[in-house]
Image: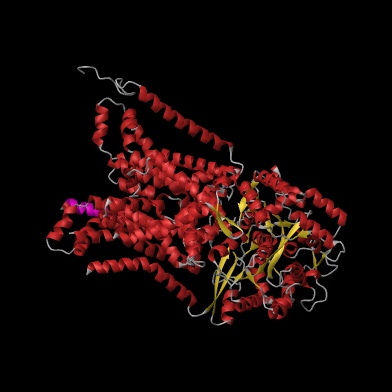
């Protein structure tokens, strides 16, 4: 009993630590003042109005999402193909490939960022959309590999051979047999890529085109300058992102629960 | 059959090319810059940066400081993250997935936004103006805790209960069972957790700048400064190389290169 | 067939970033001529909401010049700008570095000269302040750079917390009284300047007494200014070493270093002293003042002050230069546009900094802001107004004969003195000189140590504890290895036979 109470207490304290700052922002997104002041709260939707009127922030939001989708899609295609290739290659090939693939995962982001900046400055592609997207792909693709490879290992290799025996072409077999079996891995690789891309600051800062901003670079600059008049509106933005997250979590779990029930019913 | 095998293998060619172009070559560039110097607009081979690093008090102090911050942050993450992951993994609560989600959900909110939120909170509590180091460590823990919980949870969840039962049947008390069975079996999770937390805590300067009022220089910041302020790419590359060596050594020491451990890093976030 | 589609998709995946980047270029260009401007953050009038009353200068310029698109991006420090230029190659038409960086870029042959026609007949030639133009001519920059904004450096402070007397000297912030209440710049050169001023306080004071220069027309001005400039740009080994110690010593009293956030921290009262550029000082003072909004609601605030310590100051400029390969004609057009007095006023309104442009519109705006009456009038407390002479700046750029405004005594601690320094302040101010590569490296090394040292004692303790821990673990393993395996391991009971 004591143990249970202790466990619950620990979880509660840690959750409080994790959510206190976010909740603070959510609550004070309904307060108009520039600085959060505990003794002074004037309820208003002012910040939300500012947020949606602020073309700059809207553009940045769009940029961020667009970049994440493109980078994640490209990484997923490249990574899935890479994982299949690695899986069917001889150890002599697959081992070094996997090792190199680990570099961006364990490397410090700043090192990845400057190494890419150096490369792109040499080929006159510094601060272009190309460098930005490649930068994000370097971050994401290894994680796609990491999500897909285990699924390939779990896969029953006989099914592929069976498909061939039954007259499927290798490509048909690949698309109809292999891909469906590793699909959950591909999907989680894609989602992971989106998360990584949305979250990234350092690589973006070193590869982005001059006039392009994502939420990360914009907010960090706002903190650095302190003067940016739209900073308070960012509270509203954080609140919205947070609420969307909660909603996503709820839907995800409700549907997962429903699916389980259905399975049980069968 | 031969032909078919060939075609499936071929699929890794684009990725191999990608890695060569955008991972290997950039790394070689860093290596090149690290061991060269610009003298009269000419680039010459030199060990000067290497020597400079190990004779400069500022750089060595920065290295030590980053190390300390990273070790403390990682230790705190492990101390908080392990019990949490353990409780979650062992609990019989039906919806423990939801609970786990609660712990890792902040990962989906942009980390710069989260750190800014934390900054506001620390400002309200009155820590922001005086406790730069403490704030930085709090920030690192805040930011990277999910990276610790996730792999730990994954390994602990997979843990075969029969081992634990066997251990206690053989006369181990609760503590011994934990220390001699549970913990060793969860090592892959611990190791990938540590590698996921340690490196960013040494280098993520967004956290130290935002919460330390630009008072604290960590290794990542120093590299950044050499490229954006001090106009010395050679030194910046040298520091990067030293950082890479440190990463490599930590991985070697913790066995992070073993297959079982890299798999746990597959980040089962989704 | 599908295989081919798949490989096509793959090839496409690899090529897509390329295509996108080309598309990106095309969409930003759109057949237009692009003017690529690289400026400091918040350094041009640019309203950020629809209901903002500020002028959008870039949009105006684009409207006046159909077919021209301005690609506007910003930087935080001179050094960032320089490195970005170096990494990125010739990708800007117009950048706005400060004095010493302009010198460095000229010396390194990185900039295009202005056309003679522009130097002689542009709006800049017509309206720029004679004082500024003189200065550029004297230093030999006039061909390569035109001034944009200028000012002094000093302390913005909150008089409710800080004693004005303390800040009459640069040394005032090395003070336990103001612990965690001060920010200085996270910028090598500015903070080095502060350190040097502190290091040579006595020498500067002695010099001041010896020459006693209060006006630019003083016969000793040239000699005095040369000496101050020499001191403030000293970089010999002893100076570097001492300044480093001074700044490390200062760190214990600081709230932090800032790139640009000092203004906001000052306005909300998080800090009480900010080592600031005069323009930022004006901005902070404006924003911090109490005010009543359009609904008649009173908002509390602070009346901040600005002071230039007595020993000396820095007079700084940010100027436009055209990097090699720039579109000179278009760049000049943009500067010509910005140099119209009405646009200078728009900029000053928005940024708070002082434009290098004079002229009637600027002076009238200035009268409108600061003049409190005529000669012989009194202020609220009944004290007579004092004259504030600005002839050195405005002379000859407009239709007035005498540029003197009358202000109250307190105002001399406020916006007016920050926006247009008095001649006396200018007389004791030095311009930052460009250091050669070796010196720059040495100063950077010094700065690195200032930023990185000292590390707290507990960090050594932590490292020691960890090292000890590792040692203990290793030793235990070695010891265990030698123990007999027969004994049950710790924590396990030996089960009794039959039990």
> Residue C446: x percent and y percent?
65, 49
Going by the picture, which residue comes out furthest to the left? Answer: A166
Residue C262 occupies quadrant: bottom right
Q: Looking at the figure, which quarter contains the N terminus of chain B?
A: bottom left
Q: How is the image coloured?
A: secondary structure
Q: Which residue is rendered at x = 52% and y = 46% of the image?
A: B136
Residue C26 occupies quadrant: bottom left
> As displayed, is residue B166 above or below residue C219?
above
| Magenta-colored span | A254-264
> Residue C384: x percent and y percent?
84, 63
Going by the picture, which residue comes out furthest to the top? Answer: C497
Q: Can the viewer see residue B220?
A: no
Q: Mostly what secondary structure, the magenta segment? A: helix
Q: Which residue is rendered at x = 38% and y = 49% of the image?
A: B104
> As displayed, is residue C326 above or below residue A2?
below
> Residue B258: x percent and y percent?
34, 43
* Labels in figure, total: 0
Q: Which residue is rendered at x = 51% and y = 65% of the image?
A: A50
Residue A257 covered by magenta stretch: yes
Q: Can the viewer see residue A139?
A: yes
Near-viewer residue (C16 or C165): C16
Q: Which residue is rendered at x = 86% and y = 57% of the image?
A: C212
Residue C338 covered by magenta stretch: no
> As displayed, is residue C21 above or below residue B6?
below
Q: Is residue C300 left or right of residue C5?
A: right
Near-viewer residue (B153 or C327): C327
> Residue C323: x percent and y percent?
61, 70
Near-viewer residue (B170 or B248): B248
Q: Is residue A237 left or right of residue B82?
A: right
């Amino acid at each position: 009993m004591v143990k249970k109470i202790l466990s619950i207490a620990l979880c509660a304290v840690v959750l409080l630590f994790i959510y206190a700052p976010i909740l603070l922002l959510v609550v004070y997104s309904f307060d108009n003042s520039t600085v959060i002041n505990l003794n002074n709260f004037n309820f208003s939707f002012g910040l939300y109005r500012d947020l949606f009127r602020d073309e700059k922030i809207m553009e940045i939001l769009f940029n961020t999402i667009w970049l994440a989708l493109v980078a994640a899609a490209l990484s997923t295609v490249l990574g899935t193909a890479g994982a299949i290739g690695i899986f069917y290659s001889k150890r002599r090939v697959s081992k070094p490939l996997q090792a190199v693939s680990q570099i961006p995962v364990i490397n410090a982001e700043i090192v990845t960022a400057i190494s890419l900046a150096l490369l792109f400055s040499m080929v006159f592609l510094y601060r272009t959309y190309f460098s930005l997207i490649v930068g994000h792909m370097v971050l994401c693709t290894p994680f796609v590999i990491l999500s897909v490879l285990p699924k390939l290992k779990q896969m029953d290799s006989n099914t592929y051979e069976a498909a061939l025996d039954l007259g499927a072409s290798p490509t048909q077999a690949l698309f109809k047999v292999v891909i469906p079996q590793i699909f959950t891995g591909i999907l989680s690789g894609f989602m992971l890529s989106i998360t990584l891309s949305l979250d990234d600051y350092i690589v973006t800062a070193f590869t982005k085109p001059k006039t392009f901003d994502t939420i990360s670079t914009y907010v960090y600059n706002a903190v650095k300058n302190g003067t940016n008049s739209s900073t308070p509106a960012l509270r509203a933005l954080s609140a919205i992102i947070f609420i969307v997250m909660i909603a996503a979590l709820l839907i995800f779990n409700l549907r997962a629960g429903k699916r389980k029930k259905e399975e049980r019913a069968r | 059959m031969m032909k078919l095998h060939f075609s499936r293998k071929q699929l890794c060619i684009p990725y191999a090319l990608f890695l060569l172009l955008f991972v290997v070559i950039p790394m070689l560039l860093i290596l090149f810059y690290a061991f060269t110097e610009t003298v009269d607009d000419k680039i010459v081979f030199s060990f000067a940066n290497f020597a400079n690093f190990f004779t400069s008090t500022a750089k060595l102090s920065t290295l030590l400081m980053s190390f300390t911050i990273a070790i403390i942050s990682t230790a705190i993450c492990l101390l908080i993250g392990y019990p949490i992951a353990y409780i979650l993994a062992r609990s019989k609560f039906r919806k423990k997935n939801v609970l786990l989600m609660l712990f890792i959900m902040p990962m989906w909110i942009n980390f710069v936004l989260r750190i800014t939120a934390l900054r506001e909170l620390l400002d309200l509590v009155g820590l922001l103006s005086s406790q730069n180091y403490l704030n930085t460590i709090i920030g690192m823990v805040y930011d990277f805790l999910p990276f610790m919980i996730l792999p730990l949870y994954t390994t602990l969840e997979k843990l075969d209960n029969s081992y634990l039962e066997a251990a206690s049947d053989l006369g181990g008390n609760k503590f011994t069972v934990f220390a001699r069975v549970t913990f060793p079996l969860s090592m892959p999770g611990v190791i990938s957790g540590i590698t996921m937390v340690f490196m960013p805590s040494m280098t993520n300067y967004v956290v130290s700048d935002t919460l330390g009022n630009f008072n604290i220089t960590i290794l990542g910041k120093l590299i950044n400064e050499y490229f954006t302020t001090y106009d010395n790419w050679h030194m910046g590359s040298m520091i990067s190389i030293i950082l890479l060596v440190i990463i490599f050594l930590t991985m070697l020491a913790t066995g992070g290169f073993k297959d079982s451990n890299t798999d746990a890093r597959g980040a089962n976030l989704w | 067939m599908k295989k081919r589609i798949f490989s096509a998709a793959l090839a496409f995946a690899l090529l897509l970033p390329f295509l996108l980047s080309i598309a990106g270029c095309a969409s930003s260009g759109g057949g237009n001529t692009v003017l690529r401007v690289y400026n400091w953050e918040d350094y041009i009038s640019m309203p950020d909401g629809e209901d903002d009353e500020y002028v959008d200068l870039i949009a105006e310029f684009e409207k006046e010049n159909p077919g021209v698109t301005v690609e506007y991006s910003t930087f935080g420090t001179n050094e960032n700008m320089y490195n970005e230029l170096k990494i990125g190659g010739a990708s800007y038409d117009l950048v706005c570095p400060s004095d010493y960086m302009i010198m460095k870029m000229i010396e390194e042959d990185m900039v295009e000269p202005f056309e003679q026609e522009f130097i002689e007949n542009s709006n800049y030639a017509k309206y720029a302040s004679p004082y500024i133009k003189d200065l550029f001519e004297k230093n030999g920059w006039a061909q390569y750079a035109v001034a944009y904004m200028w000012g002094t450096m000093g302390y913005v402070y909150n008089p409710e917390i800080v004693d004005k007397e303390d800040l009459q000297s640069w040394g005032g912030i090395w003070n336990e009284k103001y612990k965690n209440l001060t920010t200085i710049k996270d910028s090598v050169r500015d903070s080095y300047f502060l350190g040097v001023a502190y290091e040579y306080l006595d020498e500067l004071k002695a010099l001041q007494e010896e020459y006693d220069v209060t006006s630019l027309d003083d016969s000793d001005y040239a000699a005095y200014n040369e000496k101050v400039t020499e001191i403030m740009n000293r970089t010999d080994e002893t100076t570097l070493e001492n300044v480093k110690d001074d700044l490390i010593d200062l760190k214990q009293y600081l709230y932090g270093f800032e790139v640009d956030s000092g203004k906001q921290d000052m306005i909300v009262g998080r800090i009480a002293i900010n080592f600031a550029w005069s323009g930022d000082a004006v901005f902070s003072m404006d924003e911090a003042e109490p005010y009543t909004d359009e609904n008649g609601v009173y908002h509390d605030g602070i009346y901040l002050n600005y002071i230039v310590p007595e020993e000396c100051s820095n007079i700084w400029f940010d100027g436009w230069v055209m990097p090699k390969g720039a579109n000179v004609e278009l760049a000049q057009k943009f500067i010509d546009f910005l140099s119209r007095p009405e646009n200078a006023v728009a900029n000053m309104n928005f940024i708070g900094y002082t434009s290098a442009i004079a002229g009637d519109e600027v002076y009238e705006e200035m009268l409108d802001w600061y003049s409190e009456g005529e000669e012989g009038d009194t202020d609220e407390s009944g004290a007579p107004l004092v004259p504030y002479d600005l002839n050195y700046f405005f002379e000859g750029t407009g239709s007035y004969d005498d540029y003197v405004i009358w202000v109250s005594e307190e105002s001399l601690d406020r916006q007016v003195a920050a926006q247009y320094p008095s001649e006396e302040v200018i007389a004791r101010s030095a311009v930052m000189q460009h250091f050669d590569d070796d010196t720059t490296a040495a100063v950077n090394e010094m700065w690195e140590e200032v930023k990185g040292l000292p590390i707290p004692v507990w960090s050594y303790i932590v490292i020691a504890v960890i090292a000890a821990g590792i040692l203990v673990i290793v030793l235990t393993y070695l010891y265990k290895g030698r123990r007999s395996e027969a004994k049950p391991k710790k924590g396990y009971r030996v089960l009794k036979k039959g039990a």
